[in-house]
Amino acid sequence: MHIPTNGTPVGQKKNYCKNEKIFLQIVLYRIVFSFFLIMLSVSADMGLDIACGHIIERVGSYSGVQRQRVVWIKAEARRQEVLGNIGSAQQMKKSIRSSDHVDYETFEMTDGWLDGTRAFVDHSDCDGIWEASEAIAILEAVTTLEPFFDEDAKSYYFDDHGHYYLRKILMYCVRHKKDIVFC
């Protein structure tokens, strides 16, 4: 009997159809399962990170970043009220649509905003960087606004020593004059 190179004896047919179906089902299941695992890991890691030198910090989930911007605007508005700038404070509050959403259509940076608040709140996550001058301004704004943050925000964004959670990377940026890169 002559056996060709594909391993099937001449005159005999192998039932490839059933084996191919099973093989394709297994491959399809593996692809779907792999895709599910990838999507699960990607969705768990979605959010805004920043890097400077060897330091990488998580700013938060995308919705968490928006909530933090609302917290900053509220603190800035409270500061403006204390300074007697009621109109400015009211304008700031108008831009808050909900506890986790800034209405950028009505959002307006009025006079009196701290430069650091401006850098943090009015910064597109796609802009790419904060320069050292912006990091200094953010650190100064955090120090100035800290008394105006509500207690929930303080407990969430500040550690037990009263340091803002992004302080380390902001300080590194300032000390080494390196940009903070959004990633």
Image (cartoon, helix red, strand yellow):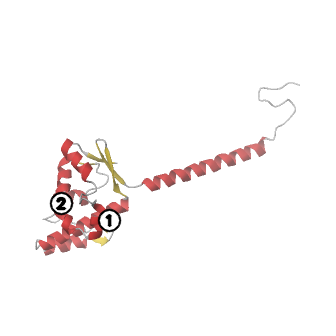
Residue 162 got which mark?
A: none
Q: Secondary structure at mark 1?
A: helix
**In which quadrant of the rendered image does the N terminus lie?**
top right
- Residue at 21% x, 56% y: name it: 119
Point out which mark residue 143 bears: 2
| SS state under label 2 | helix
Left-right relation of 132 to 7:
left
The three-letter code of the residue at mark 1 reads Arg
Where residue 173 sits in the image (x, y, percent)?
A: 22, 46
Q: Quadrant of residue 145?
A: bottom left
Question: How far separated are the C-alphas under marks 2 and 1?
Answer: 19 Å
Instruction: Looking at the image, tell me whether mark 2 or mark 1 is earlier in sequence order.
Output: 1
- In this view, the mark in front (2 or 1): 2
Q: Residues within 10 Å of mark 2 (few under 14, many from 20)?
A: some
Residue sitting nearer the eye, 47 or 103: 47
The spot of residue 142 in percent (x, y) is 20, 60
Q: Tell me if 127 is positioned left or right of 88 in this view.
A: right
Bin the neighbour count of mark 1 within 10 Å (Cα to Cα): few under 14, some 14-19, many 20 and up.
some
Left or right: where 25 falls relative to 111: right
108 w.r.t. 60: above or below:
below
Q: Amino acid at mark 2?
A: Thr
Q: Which residue carries the number 1 mark?
A: 67
Answer above or below: position of 179 versus 156: above
At 28% from the left and 66% from the top, the residue drawn is: 153
**Looking at the image, residue 17 lies above or below residue 84:** above
Point 28% across, 51% down: residue: 127
Percent position of residue 111, x then y? 13, 65
Q: Residue at x 28, y 63 (%)?
A: 69
